[in-house]
Amino acid sequence: MTIDTASAPRAQRDTPGVIRTSPLAVTEVRWALTATALFLAGLAAQLSGAPEWLFWALYLACYAVGGWESALDGLRALKGKTLDVDLLMIVAALGAAAIGQIFDGALLIVIFATSGALEAVLTRRTADSIRGLLDLAPETATTVDTSGDERRVDAADLHIDDIVIVRPGERIPGDGMIVDGNSDIDQSSITGESIPVFKAVGDDVFAGTINGTGSVRVRITVDPSETVVARIVAMVERASATKAKKQLFIEKVEQYYSSGVVVATAAVFAIPMLFGSDLQSALLRAMTFMIVASPCAVVLATMPPLLAAMATAGRHGILIKSAVVLEQLRLSDVVVFDKTGTLTEGTPRVDRIDAVTGLNQDEVLRIAAAAEMGSEHPIGAAIVDFARIRGISVPVASGFESTPGAGVSAHLDGRAIAVTKPIGAELGSPTKRIVDECEAAGMTVVLVWIERRPVGVIGLVDTVRPGAWTAVAEIERITGNPAVLLTGDNRSAALNVAKRTGIWDVHAGLLPDDKADAVTELQARGSQRGEGTPYRVLVVGDGVNDAPALAAADIGVAMGRTGSDLALDTADAVLVRDDLGALASVIDLSRRAHRIVVANLVIAATFIVVLVAWDLIGTLPLPIGVAGHETSTVIVALNGMRLLSSRAWRVHGADRSEAVADQS
């Protein structure tokens, strides 16, 4: 797969490698904005008592600008022997203008134009983000031949068995295996692990991951078109294409309704003519029928409540990308969480300090912080930060050295000090017992040394987000099913976070495609239990490695502050403030919006049935028909606007204590 990103204008790149299309560059947006401006100008002219010809001219210009594309699409559908609601809306808008209700027709045009523009922008942004993902892997690589000569080549031209040199700080250009050297590799973009992983000869590495302080040689074992990054692109594209076919319920029946109204209107006009009715009265009856039967109230019964709910969710930190997403949220059966950056903040913190000699905890921390002061590793930063929080004055050490995969060393007060991983260390019984306890609890463990003698053990954990326990509990209560944890991190770390968040269904050590497969398996679980329909799965994640799962899920939700560009654009909704507690509230809001939509549809249908029956059985005066039509429109619109109220947002679990999680 080759996608040209280099040709994009520089101004459209807001992060390296990620192309951003300005909304104004999308044709549908420009037409919708122009139509809206004309509509508002016409409304202002009408309300200010301007000459009738002026606001009519502005409204008709709104018709032309905002409706030409829907009219063209409708005519194309008609040419293909189908009839859709786009054409019916244009006909209804023209019919409204024909009987003097120009404002109603223009409002319908603006609603449809705005909806089409939003869909076009989201589609374009997702495509841009998928293309930008390919830039995770570097564009070039340094190969070395058997004679030791180095050559710079395009990463896309690498072949299996090529040897590449990856120096400190560089991204690995392809999937392969280390054949020389060792280093700490930041694999967070692929596996989601919050702490770099030590890799040595014989270990596999992935394209796009970042090399630490060591220099390594990697033998390419996978063709560039089949790397993990390339597979992520393919999976996201396939899943996004599938999800794009989802529609609102009202859209699923629009063709049948549109066809029925057109056929019925023709019959209402033709049948009286066959029985000798004059042209004017037959045309007036038919026009009245089309107006009262047109789906204006039905459209307003559906969209305003959903848009109002989307606005309310936005005020409370959740960006919902479409009305379809809002409607689908209510159906969520199972919620799946990523670990690093989602349930946790993605940064380690010191959780336990044990002194194994005559020193106390503060002295152990002081020595460790002095040794780590020159380190850029997340563990070192966490130790130094914790020492400062404890108010410990960190002395300046000399002779700092860092050994990839092992740790750091320095000199303090004439003594050699070090902070290392416990791998390969010969430890006495008390120290080994503490290390085993920490590792069993899912902690990352380091040893603190003075003159090659262990003096302390420090255990670090990933920081769980405040409110995660309560958020999980409320999600499980509102969906009726246990939450699930999917992570690329090791099982011990996953179980540690799961225990502190109240999740018991844990899947660890997963690559991105494994996460997508796990989501698919969850979707099939409902049918396997004999419930007849698959589970609808909502996935919450933040990283590139979560993108395939977000795309495969029925609903994908990305973390707004920590989320990668691909996760944000692939997801259907975004937690702008990273507040997991809002998930239960937005599902509840979706269910309330659905109830209001159903009530509105009943109201709209009742008005339509009564007015149509009156027109067919008796003689419905046009003013009464228009008044009834407008009354139903106003009622459903006001009913939907109730979701704009602050009372529409219910905070779940606000009175629950996080102490339960701490005690676990």
Image: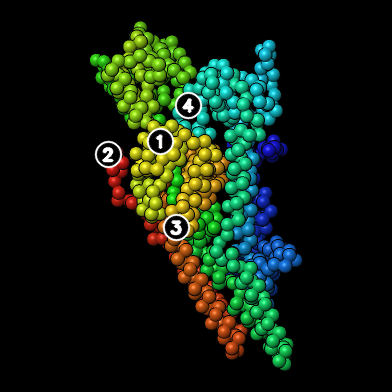
Q: CA distance from mark 3 to mark 4?
A: 43 Å
Whichever of callouts 1 and 2 sits on the residue coming sooner in the sequence is 1
Residue at label 1? 494
Front position among marks 3 and 2: 3
Residue reaching furthest to the left: 358
Could you tell me how far apart the alpha carbons at marks 3 and 2 are, in whole angstroms? 36 Å
Circle 1: element type: helix
Q: Earlier in the sequence, mark 1 or mark 3?
A: 1
Q: Position of residue 532 (x, y in %)?
A: 47, 58
**Mark-to-mark CA distance, 4 and 2:** 29 Å
CA–CA distance in space, label 1 to label 3: 30 Å
Q: Is residue 437 left or right of residue 615?
A: left
Instruction: Say which residue label 4 marks.
Output: 196
Residue lying farthest top?
414
Q: Are marks 3 and 2 in contact (CB under 8 Å)?
A: no
User: Which mark is on residue 663?
Assistant: 2
Find disc 3 in the rendering and name its residue.
Answer: 531
Marks 3 and 4 in Cβ contact (< 8 Å): no
* Amino acid at pointer 2: Gln
Tell which circle, 4 or 2, labels the residue nearer the N-terminal end: 4
Q: Residue at x 69, y 86 (%)?
A: 271
Quarter of the image where one finds residue 467: top left
